[in-house]
Image: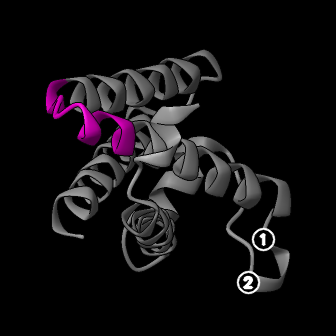
């Protein structure tokens, strides 16, 4: 697995953490959280009611996406990184449509992944 030895792990880690924190803000009541929760048919709870599995899964998914983007940096193939981010966002939107989220909730989820992709790509370029 030689490809992993060339990944910029600092950029991967920082990007993962920053993208995760963006999610906290993105889905907060101050930004899109209230209307997103209504459209997703979930209740926004307090910090001590956060769904641990969902948060852990999100963190792992961001880390995996950051690693993929880190690998594309090695090959200097930014278009692959962009296409991967678009594919993940579109799969997520498709899943949202299947569970009948509102268009607003699907759009919030879609653009959260796009913003995360931008953050992860930027971290690979800056660090």
For residue 75, what is the image quadrant?
Answer: top left
Please give the range of residues in magenta. 69-79
For the N terminus, the image quarter is: top right
Tell me the SS state at disc 2: helix
Give how far across and how far down residue 53 sits, in percent.
Answer: 83, 54
Identify the mark at residue 35; answer none if there is no mark: none
Q: Residue furthest front?
A: 2
Was residue 19 drawn as part of the magenta stretch in this picture? no
In the image, residue 63 above or below residue 80? below
Badge 2: few (under 14), some or many (20 or more) residues near its Cα, within 10 Å?
few
Q: Is residue 53 left or right of residue 89?
A: right
Return the residue at label 2: 47
Give how far across and how far down residue 13 sits, in percent.
Answer: 49, 67
Q: Residue at x 74, y 82 (%)?
A: 46
Q: Residue at x 29, y 43 (%)?
A: 114
The structure's colour scheme is one colour
Kindly check if marks 1 and 2 are in contact, taking CB atoms under 8 A apart as contact: yes
Return the residue at label 1: 50
Q: Is residue 120 left or right of residue 109?
A: left
Give how far across and how far down residue 81 sits, in percent.
Answer: 27, 32
For residue 106, what is the image quadrant?
Answer: top left
Badge 1: few (under 14), some or many (20 or more) residues near its Cα, within 10 Å?
few
For residue 50, what is the image quadrant?
Answer: bottom right
In the image, residue 71 above or below residue 98? below
For the C terminus, the image quarter is: bottom left
Magenta: main secondary structure: helix
């Amino acid at each position: 697995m030689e490809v992993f030895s060339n990944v910029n792990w600092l950029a991967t880690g920082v990007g993962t953490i920053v993208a995760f924190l963006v999610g906290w803000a993105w889905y907060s009541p101050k930004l899109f959280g209230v209307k997103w929760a209504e459209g997703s048919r979930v209740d926004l709870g307090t910090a001590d009611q956060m769904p641990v599995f969902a948060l852990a899964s999100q963190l792992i998914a961001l880390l995996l996406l950051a690693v993929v983007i880190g690998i594309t940096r090695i090959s200097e193939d930014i278009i692959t990184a962009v296409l991967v981010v678009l594919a993940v966002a579109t799969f997520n939107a498709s899943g949202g449509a299947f569970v009948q989220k509102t268009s607003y909730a699907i759009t919030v989820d879609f653009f959260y992944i796009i913003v995360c992709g931008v953050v992860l790509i930027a971290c690979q370029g800056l660090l």
